[in-house]
Amino acid sequence: MRYLSFAAVAVLLAGCAQLSADGGMTDVAHSVQQQIGKEVVKISTDAQAGRAREQVTALLGGTLSTEQAVQIALLNNRSLQAAYNDLGISEAEYVQASLPPNPALSLMRIAGTGVANFEARLVGDILNLITLPKRTAIAAERFGQARYRAIGATLRLAAETRRAYVRAIVSRQQVGFLEQTRATADAAARLIAGMGEAGGGDQLDQAEIAAFRAEIGTRVEQAKLQANRDHEALVRLLGLSGAGLVFRLPPELPPLPPSLDTMNDLEVEAIRRRVDLEIARREVAALAKSLSLTEATRYISMLQLAGIFNNETANPLTNFDTAINRGGAQIDLQIPIFDTGEARTRAARETYMQALNLLAGKAVDARSEARIAYVTYRATYDIARSWRDRVLPLRQRVSKEIMLRYTTGVLAGEGLRVDLFKYLADTRVRIAANAASLDAQRDFLVAVIDLEAVLTIGGEYSSSSAPAARTPTLNMQ
């Protein structure tokens, strides 16, 4: 019997899960490497923190590329590290759930009138022990969900960093273009002021150019404010502070690709790769196991077995001069008179069906999101290319002709002359066209990021948290 007990304990301990050295990060790191080719690490020691700081410092040494920005965020963002801590907590809960219940030891001693009675009870939760494999399987599914949540948090941070990077560059480009326009307006204002001093100026022209300069100055300040906001959004995602706040970005966005690749089976790809769908699948699996466990324990919710040893000392008063030892067993079973477990079973079944319906709904949403993301990807490319190849060249031709006629107005014929109002109106239109072209280029690059996010992350992670701020167009009235 003793050997059977030892064997039972050995089998139980062999089935227990073990805490990993990295808190469950191996699968996460492998998946992220496959998805986006980036290194992730859970920082738990000073040595790991020091290595991460060295990598970040090295990456900040030159002009920051998109991929470098993403790698910095994955190494330096504290919210991501908190998500990895959640994974470690989930692993600990999984290991805890796989352990057999500890037995309880109860000791009792009663003495009086020359006799002492000592009793020891070793109590074990038999129901908990019987259901241990099923509860361990449920905890394993929950831990699997936590791994995918950590993967999703990593991919979401990478996508948000790419979006913030694009917006930060566009904002700076908008400031640069408006600064150039302000310089041109300042030169025109000086020219008209000089003409006024020579007696050939027009007070209306001077008022028009002064108003235009003030308008451009306001637009520059608005653009700088937006650039600062976008810069700080990127800084937060990169987890930078102190000396790390100073880094270099490229002066402009990369050019549009010459063409787009046709993507087939987008819906199938989304169903296969999306993290939120995998989390939902594991939720269904966990709840299916939980429902089975609930149904199996519907009528029995408490079952305890106790081994009892009782020792009664010698009692001279009753002519017993030897101690009496007794042994036995006790079983505690809850009688299901009022609570038959029907409510628990119904709740478990409804919860399972709810998860199943949510999974089916997510699958429908995934297909729709993949379709609209691809349509947006194609449309934003066509729009950006139209601005670049058609609108801006035509706008430049018009502006060049207006500038020529304005600067040679004295020599031009009566029908060909252009006044200052026409010149300023064209400048306003040109500013708006260039701003819209930059916005269109930005929207395409963000659509590329969103398409990949829809295919891999899904749910709330599949689109940017807020629409990008548009550069305000100048009033032409």
Image (cartoon, helix red, strand yellow):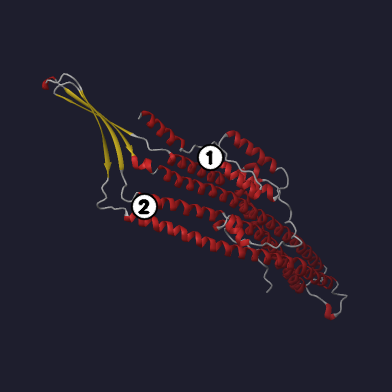
Residue 472's place in the image compared with 305, above or below, is below
Residue 7's place in the image compared with 148, above or below, is above
Sequence-first disc among 1 and 2: 1
Quarter of the figure with residue 188: bottom right
Circle 1: element type: loop
Left or right? Give the position of 281 relative to 320: right
> How far across and down, in percent of the image, does residue 152 sit?
56, 51
Question: Does the image show residue 403?
Answer: yes
* Residue shown at 64% from the left, 64% from the top: 374
Question: Does the image show residue 210?
Answer: no
Q: Which mark is residue 23?
A: 1
> How far across and down, in percent of the image, does residue 198 sit?
83, 68
Q: Which residue is mark 2?
A: 295
Q: In this orientation, which residue lies closer to the viewer: 167 or 201?
A: 167
> How far across and down, in percent of the image, does residue 229 sit?
62, 55
User: How far apart are the two marked residues, 1 and 2, measured between alpha carbons?
Assistant: 33 Å
Q: In this orientation, which residue lies closer to the viewer: 181 or 150?
A: 150
